[in-house]
Image (spheres, helix red, strand yellow):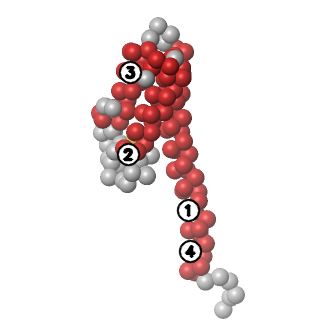
Amino acid sequence: MGAGPQRSSMVVLKLLTLAPLVLLFVALGYAATLLAAIINVFFIRIFVPALRLPQARDILLQFYSGPRCLTQSRGFKNFPWWISLWGGMGKNQRLIRTCGRLTAWTISLVYGKSAS
């Protein structure tokens, strides 16, 4: 018999190698979603300069208050709250609230302090 590692230890080693990569991509997906919530405000401010504060606030925050804007019509809605990357924000209430708060904060930063 060879002196190589056992099959079970190789499976554990593969899982220990693969788990951080999966967590990294999940974290990158969350970071991209949060960054998109901030960048949306800047894009609206730059590309639609005629849009003023009350209308901009209503338009930008509707994405995080109207459930039909968040859920896709296809599957992937039954994942836990921490894996909603494949179906958009879906039912991930934590991510929706965080993106809404980030958007409101960015609106007050970009449009002025009277946005609250």
Q: Quick one: label 4 or label 2, which is nearer the N terminus?
A: 4
Kind of residue at disc 4:
Val
Q: Quick one: label 3 or label 2, which is nearer the N terminus?
A: 3
Label 4, residues with CA under 10 Å away: few <14, some 14-19, many ≥20: few
Disc 4/disc 1 C-alpha distance (Å): 12 Å
Provide the residue designation for mark 1: 19
Disc 4/disc 3 C-alpha distance (Å): 50 Å
- Return the residue found at the far top: 50
**Residue 105 or residue 114, whichever sits in front:** 114
Kind of residue at disc 2:
Asn
Q: Quick one: label 4 or label 1, which is nearer the N terminus?
A: 4
Describe the element under mark 2 as helix, strand or loop.
loop
- Return the residue found at the far bottom: 1
Q: Quick one: label 1 or label 3, which is nearer the N terminus?
A: 1
Q: Position of residue 7 (x, y in %)?
A: 58, 81
Q: Quick one: label 2 or label 1, which is nearer the N terminus?
A: 1
Q: Position of residue 108 (x, y in %)?
A: 49, 22
Q: Which mark is residue 62?
A: none
Kind of residue at disc 3:
Ile
Provide the residue designation for mark 3: 59
* Residue in the picture at 54% in, 23% down: 109
> Which dot, 4 or 2, sits closer to the camera?
2
* Residue in the picture at 35% in, 36% down: 70
- State whether residue 53 is above or below residue 15: above
Describe the element under mark 4 as helix, strand or loop.
helix
Describe the element under mark 3 as helix, strand or loop.
helix
Q: Is residue 88 visible?
A: no
Provide the residue designation for mark 2: 92
Q: Which mark is residue 11?
A: 4
